[in-house]
Image: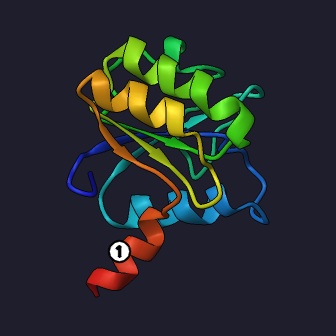
């Protein structure tokens, strides 16, 4: 999925102390388009934000999930609904039934991993 271009980062707000902020900066530095998804919909890293995946008016390749595991399944279902190509659950975000639904829907699925770490491993 690291080769996919457009990443919606669910839970990305404008707080630089949060992991989503740092990871999204790495994604941008690697040439990805980052779309912040947060209820407050404030721009992050100069990127237009949306309050939900359904509001994004263009195609999303990867939905990167930085929410609590108890909410991750809902986000995964939204990713399927919008036609994303993949879902990435960050470290600590675990939902086996959501993983199964995403996989059965034909999307790529990564769980309990971080793209920033994966890029570091490639270096």
Q: What count of labels does the image hold?
A: 1
26 vs 43, left or right, is left
The quarter of the picture where residue 41 lies is: top right
Residue 101 pos. (x, y %):
41, 24
Foreground of the two, 110 or 104: 104
Foreground of the two, 43 or 79: 79
Q: Is residue 59 visible?
A: no
Foreground of the two, 100 or 65: 100
Q: Secondary structure at mark 1?
A: helix
The quarter of the picture where residue 100 lies is: top left
- Residue located at (67% from left, 63% from top): 19
- 7 to 100, vertically: above or below: below
106 vs 17, left or right, is left
- Residue located at (58% from left, 40% from top): 95
- Residue located at (52% from left, 39% from top): 96
The quarter of the picture where residue 118 lies is: bottom left
- 79 to 96, vertically: above or below: above
Q: Is residue 12 visible?
A: yes
Residue 67 pos. (x, y %):
69, 41
Q: How is the image coloured?
A: rainbow
Residue 74 pos. (x, y %):
61, 21
Residue labelled with disc 1: 119
- Residue located at (46% from left, 70% from top): 116
């Amino acid at each position: 999925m690291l080769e996919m271009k457009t990443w919606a980062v669910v839970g990305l707000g404008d707080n630089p102390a949060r992991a989503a902020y740092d990871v999204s900066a790495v994604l941008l530095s690697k040439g990805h388009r980052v779309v912040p998804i947060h209820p407050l919909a404030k721009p992050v890293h100069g990127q237009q934000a949306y309050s939900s995946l359904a509001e994004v008016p263009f195609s999303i390749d990867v939905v990167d999930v930085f929410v609590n595991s108890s909410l991750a399944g809902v986000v995964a279902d939204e990713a399927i609904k919008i036609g994303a190509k993949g879902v990435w659950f960050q470290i600590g975000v675990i939902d086996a039934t959501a993983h199964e639904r995403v996989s059965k829907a034909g999307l790529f699925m990564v769980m309990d991993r971080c793209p920033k770490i994966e890029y570091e491993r490639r270096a």
